[in-house]
Image (cartoon, helix red, strand yellow):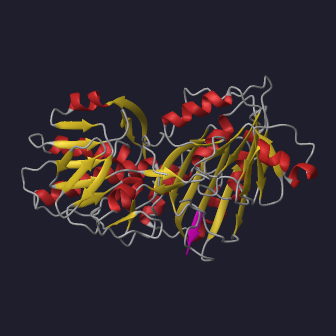
Amino acid sequence: MASDRDPFVIAGGGIAGVTCAEQLASQFPSEEVYLLTASTLVKTVTNFKQVSKTLEEFNIEEQPSSVLEGKYPNLKVVQSAVKLLQVKQHLVQTEDGRTFRYKKLCLCSGARPKLLTWDNPHVLGIRDTDSAQELQKRLSKANRIVVVGNGGIALELVYEIEGCEVIWAIKDKAIGNTFFDAGAAQFLIPSLEPDKKDRSLPCKRARYTTDQTGAGQSGHSGELGSALGPDWHEGVELRGAEKRSGSTHIEYGCEVEKIYTQQDFLMSDLNKENSNLGMWPVYVRLTNGTVYGCDFIVSATGVVPNTDPFLRGNNFELASDHGVKVDDHMLTSEQDVYAAGDVCTAGWEPSPLWQQMRLWTQARQMGWYAARCMAAKVLEESIELDFCFELFSHITKFFNYKVVLLGKFNAQGLGQDHELIVRCTKGREYVKVVLSGGRMVGAVLIGDSDLEETFENLILNQMDLSRYGEELLNPNIDIEDYFD
């Protein structure tokens, strides 16, 4: 059994783990806190700004662990990943052979990339800083690459790459469908044109119901570093070998069927059918029958929770997405073991306006809340589910546009019971609100609309907006004045 003198232990040096460790170290200055991490650098939140009730903006910086230890004398960073967890004995063993006893443990090991294949040197997964630098190195010699995947990293990567032809293979009918609908995708597509010029055209508004297919959400244990920050491509020169600006070609509704080495391809029947493809280090056949040769393939096909180090000999309840299931106090099914961030899956009945997505904001919120729950348990205090789980909210940047997502922004789980109102000014802004029963339940704001706080309030207070109709998005009406 654990004793009160045993330390708090946090496994994982990403945003959830570091946030959890900092919170515990500051709340219990006389207690030891151990942060176990595979990486030499830890992820820290900087320039944190509470934009509104639920929206928050921050930067992420990689810092040496000594910076963290300098801030909190009772916090020790151990640079070694977890090898074995024995929950009955309250013991964690690290890869370097050390053993740590804990009174409370928080699993914050994040997620690992779902790579197309693990054993092909021509397939590169982008997840941590090392892989981003490897990409930069390889790109400098590349003329054409194939990018597979449709999440945040794929979106940023395709936009940032210059001097290299990009073939982008996505399994969906539109780009970025984890984050927005086909209308928003169409708004963003011109940003991929080589000239990338802004052209503002007259504003159009439309009101319609949708073909409800639901928002897609993506789901080899090497020692992975922490996942990349939202601004991972800043300071990484993503330039190929070609002098021209490079072009992007999107293959919709397909996945990778097979990857060929140059030798295999030359010996296959495909070579006879596609003799005009030229000589490339690697070839890829897509499920739509198209074949491309390229310098290398970037696998950006989502992540899977990194639970492997903790499962052997223990009885963790896992969710269908393989995340460790946690209750509304971030507690797993094992005694004194909590989890936060990408490794866990929310097992409580969520608010009608919130859903879990493995994003930076949620990793920070969960790490912070898990620490508060661990503290409350030790101090024998009660604690309510934090307000940040009341409304889904996320600020990010895609294609150099500010993007704000609120509530059921893609009408997740609403079936046919909703309508959309959209305002779009080409090259400037795309605003969509999701209404259900006359009440706003979600919104997507691309560009500088400055409507996020107003919409957040309308979603939270569930005011009946039926009488406003399309006027809700009339650009000539100052909507903030209406609802202040």
Question: Which residue appears at 30% of the width and 31% of the height?
Answer: 65
Where in the figure is residue 125, as x and y percent of width and height?
58, 44
Of 472 and 354, nearer the camera is: 354
Image side of residue 269 versus residue 181, left or right: right
Q: Residue furthest top?
A: 243
Q: Is residue 146 magenta?
A: no
Of 103 and 82, nearer the camera is: 82
User: Height in image: 258 above or below 140?
Assistant: below
Where in the figure is residue 206, as x and y percent of width and height?
72, 61
Q: Does the rendering let one see residue 249?
A: no
Of 49 and 366, nearer the camera is: 366
Where in the figure is residue 377, as x and y percent of width and height?
15, 60
Query: For residue 290, which quarter of the picture?
Result: bottom right
Where in the figure is residue 287, as x and y percent of width and height?
77, 60
Question: Which residue appears at 27% of the width and 59% of the height?
Answer: 338
Q: Does the rendering let one see residue 155?
A: yes
Q: Is residue 436 magenta?
A: yes
Majority secondary structure of magenta residues: strand
User: Height in image: 90 above or below 271?
Assistant: below
Q: Is the N terminus in the top left, top right, bottom left or bottom right quadrant?
A: bottom left
Query: For residue 39, which quarter of the picture?
Result: top left
Image side of residue 255 versus residue 402, left or right: right
Question: Which residue appears at 35% of the width and 55% of the height?
Answer: 309
The count of marks equals 0
Residues rendered magenta in the picture? 434-438
Of 333 and 368, nearer the camera is: 333
User: Height in image: 283 above or below 432?
Assistant: above
